[in-house]
Amino acid sequence: MIKVSPSLLAADYLHFDKAVDKVIASGADALHYDVMDGEFVPAITFGEGLLDFLSKKPIAMDVHLMIVHPEKHIKAFADAGARYITIHQEAAGFGMADTLKLIRECGCLAGVSIKPFTNVDALTDVLDLVDLILIMTVEPGKGGQKLIPFTLDKVRQIKSMCEQKGVSPIIEVDGGINTQTAASAVEAGANMLVAGSAFFKAGDPKEFVAALKNL
Ligand code: DX5
Ligand code: ZN
């Protein structure tokens, strides 16, 4: 079963309320909430304050932390209603395992992400501490980019590493996902798809989500 998580990053910022309603009406499984700090990535987006309002809506909040020192902010995002919290391996440093444990202690599902040029081996030691692995299919930092094809090899690699270890976390992909690229991502082993621009540009969001879920 494929999960779809439309990204708020591509919404009309004057109408977040309507954007979340649109995501819910589309039949999507989660709302992808991209947090950028101006340091791990150049841009700054949204924090826990906005999440606190949006999480009152009946859809799981899929929080993607593109921030340095994620450990300092886990509790705040958990308290604000996150269901999934994903940190970046490149930002978590030596504290990665502890931060993943902290996410679970806060009652959320723990996710870890790698950027396109990070080796999947960097996740070997935390495979049993995560509920979700997010393979970035573009460089994190902005929406509307094209999927980098070699990142799908990382999806295959991480899937086989998980199988070998006997664990089956969700494998999420994020960046440049549309109906065409989604098919390749699912074929590679992804079972949760983030879509920003493609979702908000779709003429019929319900049809778009159904097409991805039926892959
Ligand atoms: C990029 C973000 C993505 C972004 C995807 O750094 O992590 O979640 O919203 O946008 P699209 O689907 O437009 O590539
Ligand atoms: Zn994201």
Image (spheres, rainbow, N blue to C red):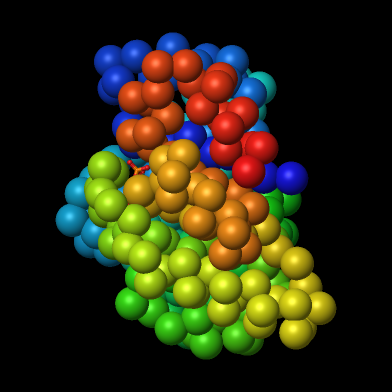
Residue situated in front as seen by the camera: 128 or 178:
178
Q: Is residue 195 among the parts visible in the rendering?
A: yes
Q: Position of residue 117 (x, y in %)?
A: 33, 77
Tell me which residue sits at (70%, 64%) in the image. Answer: 169
Task: State the residue lying farthest toward the left.
Answer: 42
- Left or right side of 134 for 114: left
**Depicted 102 relative to depicted 82: above or below:** below
Can you say which quadrant of the picture contains the N terminus?
Answer: top right
Q: Is residue 63 among the parts visible in the rendering?
A: no
Residue situated in front as seen by the camera: 188 or 28:
188
Residue situated in front as seen by the camera: 204 or 30:
204
- Left or right side of 161 for 150: left
Residue situated in front as seen by the camera: 95 or 129:
129
Q: Position of residue 52 (x, y in %)?
A: 51, 30
Tell me which residue sits at (60%, 49%) in the image. Answer: 192
Q: Position of residue 95 (x, y in %)?
A: 51, 79
Tell me which residue sits at (39%, 60%) in the image. Answer: 137
Q: How many marks?
A: 0
Q: Position of residue 146 (x, y in %)?
A: 28, 52
Tell me which residue sits at (57%, 73%) in the image. Answer: 156
Q: Residue 131 is drawn in which quadrant?
A: bottom right
- Left or right side of 101 for 77: left
Can you say which quadrant of the picture contains the C terminus?
Answer: top right
